[in-house]
Amino acid sequence: MIRSFAAAALTLAACGLAVAPAAGATEATEPAAASALPLATDVAALEGQLRSVSPAVLRDGDALTASVTARNGGTDPLEGVQVVVSLTDAPLESTDALATFLDDPAVVATTEVVRAPEVVEDPDAADPDATDQDATDDSTDDTTAADGAADTDPLPGATIEPGAATILTAEADAEALDLPADEWGVYGVAVTLETPDGEVVVSAGAVTWADAEVPGVDVAVLAVAQGSPLEVSSSLADTDLDGVAIAVDPTQLTNAMVFDNGLLTREVLRLPAGDPDVTSLAHGDGAALYEFAAQRPSGASVLPLSAMPLLAPMPVADTSSVTLASEAGALAALAGPGTVGLDSLESTVNAVDGASAPLIVPDRVLTEIVSTAAADPAVPGVLLAASALGQSQVIVSVGSEGAITPRTSRLVETLLDAPWVTPSTIADLATSADPAPAELPATAGTDGDLAAEDVTALVDALADLTTFSSTVERPADALDAWGAGLVAGVTTEARTASALREGSFNTALAGAQATLGAVTIAEGSDLNLLADSGDVPITVMNALDRDVTVTVNMDSNSPNLIVESSPTITVGAGLEATALVPVSAVSTANVTVVVGVESPGGDLLSPLQTFDIRVRADWGTAGAAVFTVLLVLLMAAGVIRTIRRGRKDTRLGPSEVPLVAPETEPDGDDLTVADAAADDASASPDQGEDTRRE
């Protein structure tokens, strides 16, 4: 059925412009009511394009109308061109029957219901008052006329000159169609162009006769917005319709997108960020990486993850994939177009053993019609007819196979406006419907998987990045950025080619290793410790674009050197810093130490570095003793010098024996010998010293 309906969809898209086969080609068709013989389709020059066919839903009192542009692509005039509308003799009972008719209307019995321009009969041909004499005169006129005179009479229908086009419209009232009263049904509609030389099929479509209530259908429309931010924004805008749920990678949302497209009032589901290949991760024990992708934060602060249930697309419909999605907290797993194993699923909602989340399946016929969105006026009628013939609960998925266009949006709106359609939500269908048991294989599609050891390598890298993120100020933001690169190494898109899988994996793993190796210890030469204690300088380099806070840990391989503590330092983005590690020396020795950078939790972050330290603890003791002795000697010399200088400053020079002087009062100008000597000694100590030596 899927193959036949796909072919029918292509036929429907192509029938918007129908061209007759080349001259000489013939094709048998069902006899029309107006002709007892099949018409040959050898009108090579005639082209027809459907302009409109309406309504999609026909009720009593309506008129079925078809309009076609007929074009003459030849060099001779085309005469007697008419548009003919035919209906299937019986209603089509299923989408399979509808697909068969769309693929080839000739295989289903049809009856002509209207043609235009209508044939106008000669009123004289049926005049009961005509006399025998009139007939004789007519016979005489015919005898004397040229043999080809009859061929010059205008043919019924339109005449189209070479290179010209005309619009032909046919209309039939519902009462004239002889459709059953108080019933409903889907009828195939065939629109053709006819000439005396043959016919051209212009379009095959359908109309739903609704003279009774059509059984109700619950329809949930799911629009998948993916691609670039611009494509996501465009898809959100084109599907801003009542009853349309949107599934989107939450990391691509912005507050502006939320407000501009009314997402706060719509059903919004989140997809695992980065489109991880759930099947490869399920087969390769990669649950941690899938859960990371499913829990990446929303880019819009006004629409958090808690407001967006998880919807998990399935590249392969197997038990392990659905179970992993269920364990990650998915509302439902989605088997959309392109899912391996889709043909085995007939119900909209399916229960899978071991999984709490259901496996939902969009209606393949409706999804195909809407997603194709052919520019053919017959498509809306076919869409509504297929919905009336389908299940009572259906999901229509758009956007997963390509961009959502305005034409897609119009078809969705047409579907939801159908009288028998009740818009529903994905959540309601997933939780309220009675699921049908689905028997799925435990594993399938392994030929498209990323190798299990490669999945393990990505999961291990995620664990290392989680530890590494504890060194930065905002660990969650750092891990989100670093882990996104790992998810890119195992995407659903990469299942299409092994070279793409390997290339994506290698790129992702190399990026993670570069991040993990961004904080290192600078290589250095041997160090000297010439004391019984001191600080050993260790330089830490940071190549990240974020500041990191790390602990420098040093281990000694000898009891001659004791590491007192492990300092914690902060290294700026793109910078380096020196940590001073305090140590104590027990005795003289050459000691090898191992130095590593650790996270605040004690996890090793970088490769270990080894250094040789020459410990000379006795050199420090001897040096201290020598220094002490020298200091004492210097102090003693200073004291002695100070004492000597103090005595010299207070010592008096020798004085002369005073001469006997007359007992008279000396004049102010007369000085004794002693006074003169004292003045001399005070004025020149050196001179006094000379005097003493004399």
Image (tube, rainbow, N blue to C red):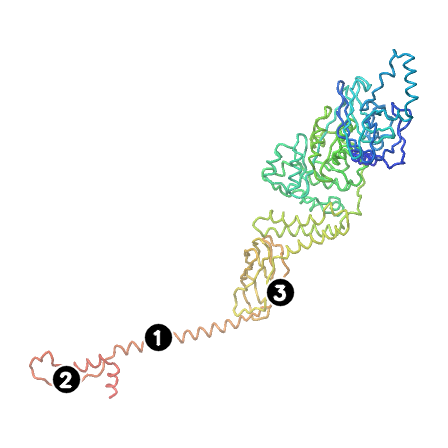
Lower sequence index among marks 2 and 3: 3
Where residue 291 sits: x, y (%)? 68, 44
Residue 531 appearing in the image: yes
> Which image quadrant is residue 224 in?
top right
Q: Alpha carbon of mark 2 to alpha carbon of mark 3: how far?
A: 90 Å
Image side of residue 576 versus residue 683, left or right? right
- If the image is split into quadrants, where does the N terminus sit? top right
Q: Amino acid at mark 1?
A: Val
On residue 658, the disc is 2
Where residue 231 sits: x, y (%)? 66, 41
Q: Amino acid at mark 2?
A: Pro
Extreme residue toward the bottom, this view: 694
Where residue 92 sits: x, y (%)? 83, 26
On residue 639, the disc is 1
Q: Alpha carbon of mark 3 to alpha carbon of mark 1: how far?
A: 51 Å
Q: Is residue 388 above or below residue 485?
A: above
Q: Nearer the viewer, residue 444 or 688?
A: 444
Q: Secondary structure at mark 3?
A: strand
On residue 610, the disc is 3
Lower sequence index among marks 2 and 1: 1
Q: Secondary structure at mark 1?
A: helix
Q: Alpha carbon of mark 2 to alpha carbon of mark 1: how far?
A: 39 Å
Q: Nearer the viewer, residue 228 or 521?
A: 228
Residue 344 appearing in the image: no
Q: Secondary structure at mark 2?
A: loop
Image side of residue 95 versus residue 475, left or right? right
**Mark 3: few, some, or many residues within 10 Å (few <14, many ≥20)?**
some
Lower sequence index among marks 3 and 1: 3
Q: Nearer the viewer, residue 584 or 439?
A: 439
Extreme residue toward the left, this view: 664
Q: Dots 3 and 1: beta carbons under 8 Å?
A: no
Image side of residue 16 versus residue 630, left or right? right
